[in-house]
Structures are given as structure tokens and as C-alpha cells.
Amino acid sequence: MDNRRPSRTVSDPKVRQVGFVTPGAAPPARYLSEVPTTAAASSPPSGEPAPPAISISPVMIPPPRHSPSPSAPLAVPNPARRESLQIQVGGYNPPEVLLGSPPLTSPSSRMDDTVSQFSEDPSMSPCDGRSGAAKVAPSFPGSSGEMMVMKAGTVGGGSNTPKSSWTTASVAKTRPGIQEKEREAFVGTQNDGAGASKTLKEKTTKAERRALQEAQRAAKAAAKESGAGVKLSAAPGGAVPANTKQGKVVKSPAQKKDGPQVANPSVSSEKKVVDRPPEKDRKKDIPPPRMQFDDIHRVEKAKRRALVYQFEAKNRVELFRHLPQYIHGTQFPDLETKFFQLDPMHPSVYKVGLQYLSGNISGGNARCIAMFLAFREAIRDYSTPPEKALVRDLTAKISSYVSFLIECRPLSISMGNAIRFLKNRIAKLPDTMPESEVKSSLQSDIDRFINEKIVIADKVIIRHAVTKIRDGDVLLTYGSPCVVEMLLVYAHEVGKQFRVVIVDSRPKLEGQALLHRLVAKGISCTYTHVNAISYIMHEVTRVFLGAASVLSNGTVYSRVGTACVAMVANAFQVPVLICCEAYKFHERVQLDSICSNELGDPDVISKVPGRKDLNHLDNWADTENLQLLNLTSHLPVCQSSCENTAGRTYGFRGLLIPIANADPAETPQRSAKALSFKQDHRLQKNSGRVLQNCCPLEKGFLSVYVSSSFDTMVHRMSDPTLAF
Amino acid sequence: MARMDFEVVVLAGGTSRKLNPLVSQEVPKALLPVANRPVLSYVLELLEASNLKDLIVVVEGEDAALRIGGWISGAYVDRLHVEVAAVPEGVGTAGALRAVASYLTANDVLIVSGDLVTDVPPGAVAATHRRHSAVVTALLCPAPVSGPSDTGTSGGKEKAKKPVRCNIVGLDPTRQYLLHMATGAEVEKDIRVQKSILRAVGQIEIRVDLMDAHMYAFKRSVLQDILDQKDKFHSIRQDILPYLIRTQLNSEVSDNGVIKSESGMDNISSQNDLRWLSQHREIAPSAFQEPHAFGLKSLPDARRTHKCCVYIANESKYCARLNSIQAYSDINRDVVGEASHLSGYSFSAQNNIIHPSAELGSKTTVGPQCMLAEGSKLGDKCSVKRSVIGRHCRIGSNVKIVNSIVMNHVTIEDGCSIQGSVVCSNVQLQERVVLKDCQVGAGYVVTTGSEHKSESLARK
């Protein structure tokens, strides 16, 4: 489906044009012409075995075809409503007419909009594959819907309405786009082949170009497809062979066809397919939330822009393909070697990028401060190039820096906020201000931001949080949150009597450093790993956690494993307090930790420090069916009651959210996560020697394990003998 | 502004005693041909490939400086912007730096030895340096196995196979920091490691398989201070670097407040957080400001530490220094052989380079990993294996040249046999000379029928 998406976007505008133009051209031809063409075309193609003929035909035919197809729309005017959708489709691909002829499949459930519109169509016949296909190949239903659309389009011909309809029916639009390809595929399968192939060719060079791209993608997908492909073939029956044949013969379009078809079943769940298109449409109105890294097209685009060479990650975990994959191992040396070759980058920004990439700087505040200090230096050294406006040029510069940093490591939410702040300041600069003043004011803005939003905020948080610590308390913290560390140190200085339990987790084991520092201060500490948390929790009286972000629904976004700590605390009725600066708040609402997360180095979880004998996962990347997942963040605590608190406290510099009854609300969307959590719990009892005792829950199924460090490891075991 | 705030100094040296009789007044070390290209060109081209085009080349001796300057301006006109500085002979690397130190302005300085033949990108060293905000970063690479790679030679060569000079390098467990450095020559029986450093790090990894490639990145301000204050320091390798390593926990170099938040050599795992914490604290109000004790081990004031880092080159990279005769023939062999991408030539299908203007007699064979430069003539029934032959050489019939380097304008008469030797320019070998593991200085004449083994022949 990935393939499909890009193509659609490209095609959309064009389609429209064609649709409008065509009506004027040759309305009647559509139906009539199509039939003949199909017939003519079909004769060669119908004989499926003759690929070469087909291939030739599409190429040859296009010229004549063009004229008829455009005419068609006019010939058969249709209700405007349909037209809108159809136009797009029809316009896009004149040949679709042919498509219309085959029995139309019933609209798939996902296709709701399109379906509803087209349901009236008499032609709608249940698609062969429909029910069965739904599961196997999302594309199939789509294709059916498409076909319907096409038909309508042909019928509808050119109407004035289409434009408006277009804009309004965003969903519908997107769908057709997607389906269009599928439809093509469908056609191919159907054996209308001749017409189809021709039509495809007609699509013009653009199509070809697209096809070329897709062909490549398809090749990739093909590798995976094999299994799925078989299924597919089964569903459509005889159609498949034709399709494949076409693919070979007609280089561009056919391959395109193949690509999507193949890709769909194999790569993506149906759900994804459904979700995508609307998302894309929405994009026009709302800024896109995030790069989806399973969207091959966009990833490739990004790659071209990237300064840091983007490598393909191996063994990606299916469920998390949409996230930027962790590829530091290969990326880092590359970036290093290019040290002197990246021209536009300011050295300090480059340095920060390297530090992100190498992990030398981690933690929300640290990264944010480092970034801002680098920007400050960059601004200090900045001078407006001649004939450019400072505001624009500087904004562009900062943007390029930011995108470089993103390539090094995805931005944290706090950094996003900080960047927005900076850009805002730049945008609001008066034009008349001289450059030197601008620079100094921006630098002082940055200083102010760091000071007020981070340093003072921390101070306020600590002042406030100290009042929550009573003598004799046992405080638990997880990992090494800096604010909590400062809090503990401060409380100790103030003279509170308390004990600290530091809960840590592999692979980072940040808690060890915290332990060292606290012990050096003379604070009495207990250190344990997260798998023992249920044993240690009963002696704890307060839990202090840090956070990467607090979202507007009260969800706290933090380091992986925090959810676990919070939940256990909740089970033991221990109050949980989150220390988070207000600049980390974000208006986003996030219900699960799947759609947005960061992947860490999968290699580190295969190694257990101090246990060289545990080397069972040493060459895990060579095992095709094994994927390791190292998530770095979790949405640990979600409590609706937090919402107001967060909103209200936003005026303050910092926030301390008391979450007395932390309840990890499990919405249906989080089912996947819930599943993993349950298993975590189970595993935790075994005190997480995951590497040793992870064994497949169910053969051939996706099973999620959580290690002691709460790294989840997802692997698909097809081979039961592959035991750890 | 210098690129990425780095300036580059190439120390091209002068005439080296160790390389006698290969080097002479006419051919300073930097111009020794490696695969018929001056060795300095390898460094310059490496830097050029990294987009570093503003270079300072420091040469010992006015004469040598003139020659080198002349060659550079001829070969790299329009490509590089090179300033050649001459320093008196015998000032050492530190002295050479001292001479140019006042011209340096960028934040960091990359210092490269002119005799380095490598494909390790200098950017990697610079990036490591920058990333750690180190005071000095050294490039270490796996020590090359010296001696001819072909087996089955006489036992005498086995001796040569051990690493020429073993460096003893102490690293922290993450292999990012340089904690100890000594050359094999300085070590007799035992090495002494500073207790304070050991205590701070907890664990030192001692390596002997690494070679100091003499590519360093220095923080300029620190380097200048050291050069100013310690006027006894003679060499980077033996004075400055050990000094910096030794004092990294108790830094005497004034940082001028440039290095704000060095967390020093503490337990490295904690370092990441610490860096920012200290940064954070520095800006933070005094409540959080008191100096932080680092790690288990309480260190002296964190501000008085600096970092010495290393970049360890990948095994797959080629890295060698031309600092001995053995190394010279090794490098020549490698550049035409396994590290052929360095030579910049395109190899023929037979894996050798024969200039089209070279003339071969009948039944003459030139084996793989050979190089035959322009204008050279070989007589009949010659055999050349794993050797480099320079320009305009006249070689008679029935000559065998194996594992050798023959420079320009050499005359070799009939029936000679040359093995494992280096024959400098303008040498004349008369009939039936047999050379084995010899070096023949420029302009020397070897008389008819003489046999030499493991000798160094030069004009008095």
C-alpha cells in the first residue's frame, strides 16, 4: 500500500485535469469506444498466455485510445454526486471504462464513502474475492470499489460539479486514488486485460515514471510477498496469472499493479491501508503529524534530502515499521567521515548532532539545552547573505539545522516546543531591526528560555516537591531523571530523612550513575532492577518519576519501563509523582506508545552486561524470522483526571502531577499494548531473565516479551526449534 | 572561517636519518616516491578528498621547504591552498608547531604527519574530537604487520615480521579515552600507570596492537599554551601527548573558560548525564551549583580535568607510516597491492600498471601488483614481480626484479637480479649484479658482478 499512496498523490491533480478536459473532448466514445477497445484489446490479452502481444498493444494503442476516453464522460452524464468521485477516477485512467464492465465488487467496509456512493450502482456485484479477499489482500476490496468508481466516472462524464465535490469528499478522493491502482491490478486479473493494459499505457509518461519507481518497490515487496501472493492468486482465481503476465509484459503499469497488490497483503494489515488514505488527505488541512517510516515513498524523498546517509535497517519489527528505525551503527561512522564535507552546517550544530547520534547527550533537558546552545552559537556567527531577508533566511537555516538534528535522532517533544519558541521569536522580529540587535536579542531569548523554562522550572518543581517528602519516607525513582536527582539532593541538603530506592533497567542502566552520585552525597540507597519492582514496592512510600512529556490528555510520555513502575505503584497504593517542566507539555493526544515512539539499538538488548555466556542472540540479525525491538519510550500513565491539572498548571513553570491512583486506562486501541503488558507482568515474576527464558508463546504468532529492562522483544517464530 | 572551525597542519619533516640512504638533500622524506608519487601527496589528497583545502605544510630545512613547496605548487595549483613554512632542522615536531602556532586561529587544529599513507577519513578524527570536546584526539590504527607478505621466503625475514614498534596504549573500557601511551622503546620491563587515572576510571585496557598514526586533533588554545609554557618540549608524540595524558585529571592548561563542563574521566557510563547535569548546574542557581562528585570515586574539581580521546580506525582501513626502510617497501607493496585504491591509478586486468610508453622486450613478464612508469624500457626475458619501477629506467635483458622498488632513471644492465631492495634514482647497476635486501643510494654505481646482501650502499 505504501506504493499506492505516493502514486495516488501524484496522480490526483492530474486526474482531475483529465476529467475536466475529457468531457469536452469525446463523450460518447467512452462507453462505446471502450467496449470495442476492450474487445479488441481483450482478444489478444484474453488469451492470457500471450504476454508480448499485450505488451505491445498497450504501447501502440494509446494514441487512438485517448480520444475516445475523454469523450466518454460527456456522453453519459450522471448524477453529480457520483461524478465527483468518478471523475477523478475516470479522468485518471481512461481505460477504467473497461473496468466498469467487469462485475463490480461490493464496496468493502473500509471504503465506506466510495462504497456508499456507488452502492446504488446496479453493476455492483459481489466481488469474488470480497469476503475472502478482505483478509488476504486489502487491495482487493479496494479494487472492486475502484472499479465501481471508474464506471461511474465514465458514465458521469464531465460535470461541473466535480470540483466542489472533490474538495469536500476528501476521503472519497483518497480512496479512489488508492484503489485506482488496485483496480488496475484487478483489471489485470480480470482479463479484461487487453483494455486494461492499453489503458494503463495511456496514462502517459507520468504513469510510467511512477511505475518505474513502483517497480522497484514492488521488487522489494516481492520478496516478502511470496506467501501472500499465493493467497491472492487463490482468491481471484484465474485472474492472477493474467495479472502477473501483464506485469511482466507491460513494464511500467503492470508492474505498478503488481507492486501494490503484492505489497498490500504482505506488508500491511488491512487497518493500515484504511487509515492511510484519509490521513494523507487530511494533510492538506492539518500539518502532518509525523513522518511514517513505512511509507516508502516519503522515506525515499527524505533520504534524498538527508545529510546523514540513511541506511536500511534489517529485521524491522512489523508493528513498528512506521517509526524511524535505529541505524546508528552504520550511520554514525558515515556522518563522522563527512565531518568536513557538510558545508552549510554550523560546527556547533554538527557537534550536537554527533552527540545525539552517539548517545553522548541524552535526556530531554540535556538535549534541549545542547540544541539551544548550539543554535545560539549559530546565531552568533550568522550573517545575512546579501539580498536575503534575515527573518526568512534565518528561519530556513534553523529549519535545516533542525532537520539535521532529526536525522541524528528524532526530536523529543520538549525540543519541538523549544524550536517552535525560537522560530516564533524569529518570525516576530521587526524588519527594521539591525542584524546585530536581532542576533543579540535572539541569543538573549535563548538564554531566557533555558533559564526560565528549564532551570527555574526545575527549581520550582523541586521546591514544591520537597514538601511532599516527609521524614522516614522511602522514595522510589526509575532510571536517572535529572529533576528527581536534583530533588533528592536538595531534600537531603534540607535535612529530610529518607531513603531512596533506585530502580534501573537494561540496557542503559542509567540508574547506576545516579546511585553513585547519590551515595557519594551520603544518601542511603537501594538499587534494584525493574523486574524486582513488585518485591520492592511494598516498602516504598512515594514514587518520583521524570517525564519526557505530558500530553494534553494527561498522558505522561517517558522512558520505557516507567509505565510498569507506575502500574505497580498503583497496585500497591503508592502515590506516584511526576516531575515535568511545563515546556515539555504538548497538546498532542496519544493513546498508545506504538504510533509514536523511538526505537533504540536492537543490538544492545541481545547483550547482557557481565554475562558473556549469554550469547544466544549474537547473530540475531541473520535470522530472518527474528526481530528484536528496543523501544525507548512509553506512555506510562494515563489518567483522565490529570487533564485538568495539566491545563491549569500550565501557567506555572513546572508541574508535579500527583497520580495517586494511576490507572493505565486501556482503550481498545491499546489492545496491542495491553497484550504486551500482560505478558510483561507474567514475565516479571520470573524476574526477567528474558534472554534465557524467552520462548515463543505461540508458534508462528507474534509474541511480545518484555525483558527485565522492559525492552520489548518481538519476534516471530516460525521455527519452533529455534529456541533460546 | 576555517572549515568546521578546524585548521590543518601537515608536518612534512625534513630528511630523516632512519631512511638513509633513500633520502638525500635532493629528495627530502616527503618527496620519497611511493608508487611513483611523493608520499606527501597521499596526505594532501586525503585532505583534499575531505574538502580540506587550506593547509599549512611545515618542513624542516630551507632547502627541503623549497623543494616541497615547488612540487606542491606544481602539482596542486588550483586545487589546494597550501602555505609551506620552513623551520630549522632538528626542532622536532613541537618546534615545528611552535613556529606556526601563532598563525592558527580556529578552534581546533588537525595535525597530520606528512609520511602517513592512509584512507582513514580525517573527518572521523575531527568529529570524535568535537563530539567529546576533547583537548586532544589521536588516531590509532591497528598496527600493520610489516615484512613482505609473501610467505616461503627465507627465515631471516621472519624476524622482520614482528611489529616494528609497538605502542602501549591504555584505554578506558569504552575505548574512547586515552589513558596511557608509551612507545615500546620506552618500556623496558614494566609500565607504570597513574594511580589517580586508574582510580577514576576503574579499569584500563592495555593494548599493544595499536599504532599511533600521528594524526592528532588538538584544541588550539591548549596547544598554544603548552607550546608557550613548555619550551623544552620537542616532539608531539613524546612530550606533548604524554603530558596531556598525564595531567588530564589535574589539568594545568588554562581553558580560558572554553571548556565549560568537563566531567572528566569518571565512570563513563555516567558521563552522558553528567555532562549535561554539570552544564545545567552551571547555569542553575547556587542551590544546585556545588561541585558534583563524579562517580564512585571522588575526583578533584571537575573543572580541572580535560579529555584525551582516541579514534580507533576500523580494521578495514589502511594506515601506515613511512618511518623506516622496511615500512617504505611495505607501503610501496601495499599501495600497488592490497591497498590499491590509495594509489589513484587504475589497474589493468593483470592487476598491474604499465604505462603505455613503457617498452617491454620479448618474453618479458610483468606480474601482478607491479608498476611500470612512463618511459621505462625492459629488455628481453626479464621478470618483474611485486615491484615498482620508476620513470625512464633502462633495464637490460635477463633481469629479475622481485619485491623491489626501482626509482627513476635507473640503469640496470643484463643479468642482474634484485630482490627485496630499494634502488634510488640515477643508480647504475652493471652486469650480473645480485642485490638482496639492499638499499642503494642515489647516483651509486654497483660494479659488474658484485653481490650484496642486506647492505646499504651509498655514495660517500
Image (cartoon, coloured by chain):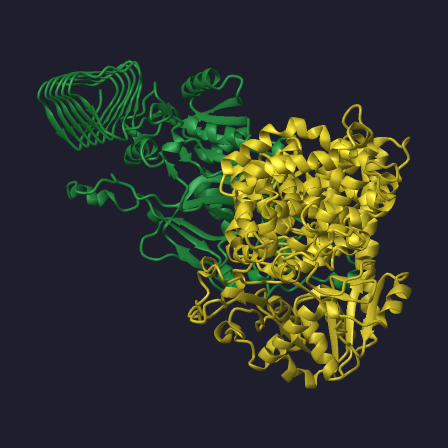
Chain colours: A yellow, B green
The answer to whether B403 appears left or right of A304 in the picture is: left
Where is residue A116 shown, x and y percent of the image? 81, 55
Q: Is B150 or A396 nearer to us in this picture?
A: A396
Q: Is A140 or B283 nearer to us in this picture?
A: A140
| Quadrant of the frame with the C terminus of chain B | top left
Work out whether residue B85 can be spotted.
yes
Image vertical order of residue B3 relative to residue B218, above or below: above
Where is residue A645 shown, x and y percent of the image? 88, 69
Image vertical order of residue A26 relative to residue A336, above or below: above
The answer to whether A428 appears left or right of B330 in the picture is: right
Query: How many numbered discs, if any?
Result: 0
Location of residue A198 by image quarter: top right
The answer to whether B305 appears left or right of A30 in the picture is: left
Q: Is A13 or B77 nearer to us in this picture?
A: A13
Q: Is A563 or B412 nearer to us in this picture?
A: A563
Image vertical order of residue A551 relative to residue A65, above or below: below
Where is residue B54 shown, x and y percent of the image? 56, 26
Which residue is at a point 68% across and 73% down the rendered structure image?
Answer: A674
Location of residue B426 by image quarter: top left
| Quadrant of the frame with the N terminus of chain B | top right
Where is residue A61 shown, x and y percent of the image? 62, 29
Q: Residue furthest bottom?
A: A538
Work out whether residue A352 can be spotted.
no
